[in-house]
Amino acid sequence: MLKHPSAWVPLALTAAILIMFGLYFARVIAPDPTGDEGTAAHLFQIWIVLEALTVGFFALKCLTAKPKEALTILGLQIVFALVPLSIVFSLRL
């Protein structure tokens, strides 16, 4: 089931946001000196919306066809999505 784009796209989006966090913490992406949220924060906000839409689409599409496999992948998608969210909330970024 991971061959379907609706299954792996949310995982890829999360991997991309984690790479962005790594670049931000390594200071490759510099914080905005003007005090604005900056590009990293805007990308994170866009990621939240895209992640919710893609996980929701996967749930609607696959839970009726193969519920056991879909629940496993849905759980994986949710756990992966919680990692960046926990980083932002724990560091108060």
Image: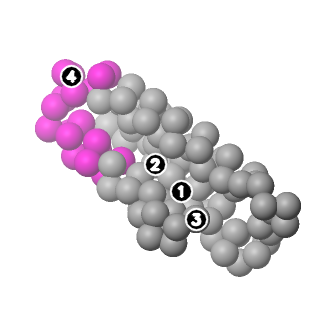
Whole-number angstrom distance, CA of label 4 to CA of label 2: 20 Å
Q: Quadrant of residue 7?
A: top left
* Residue 5 locus on image (x, y percent): 47, 33
* Mark 2 residue element: helix
Residue 15 badge? 1
Per the image, the residue denoted by label 2 is 11
Visible in this render: residue 22?
Answer: yes
* Mark 1 residue element: helix
Q: Amino acid at mark 4?
A: Ala
The outermost residue toward the bottom is: 26
Q: Residue at x 78, y 61 (%)?
A: 35
Whichever of labels 3 and 1 marks the residue nearer the N terminus, that label is 1
Whole-number angstrom distance, CA of label 1 to CA of label 4: 27 Å
Whole-number angstrom distance, CA of label 3 to CA of label 1: 19 Å
* Mark 4 residue element: loop
* Mark 3 residue element: loop
Per the image, the residue denoted by label 3 is 93
Q: Quadrant of residue 33?
A: bottom right
* Residue 66 locus on image (x, y percent): 19, 29
Q: Residue at x 39, y 26 (%)?
A: 57
Whichever of labels 4 and 3 marks the residue nearer the N terminus, that label is 4
Whichever of labels 1 and 4 marks the residue nearer the N terminus, that label is 1
Q: Is residue 45 above or below residue 38?
A: above
Q: Amino acid at mark 2?
A: Leu
Q: What segment carries the magenta color?
A: 60-77
In reply to whether residue 61 is colored magenta, the answer given is yes
* Residue 13 locus on image (x, y percent): 54, 47
Where, quadrant-wise, is the C terminus in this rendering?
bottom right
Q: Residue at x 46, y 63 (%)?
A: 89
What secondary structure do most residues of the magenta stretch adopt? helix
Of circles 4 and 2, the one toward us is 2
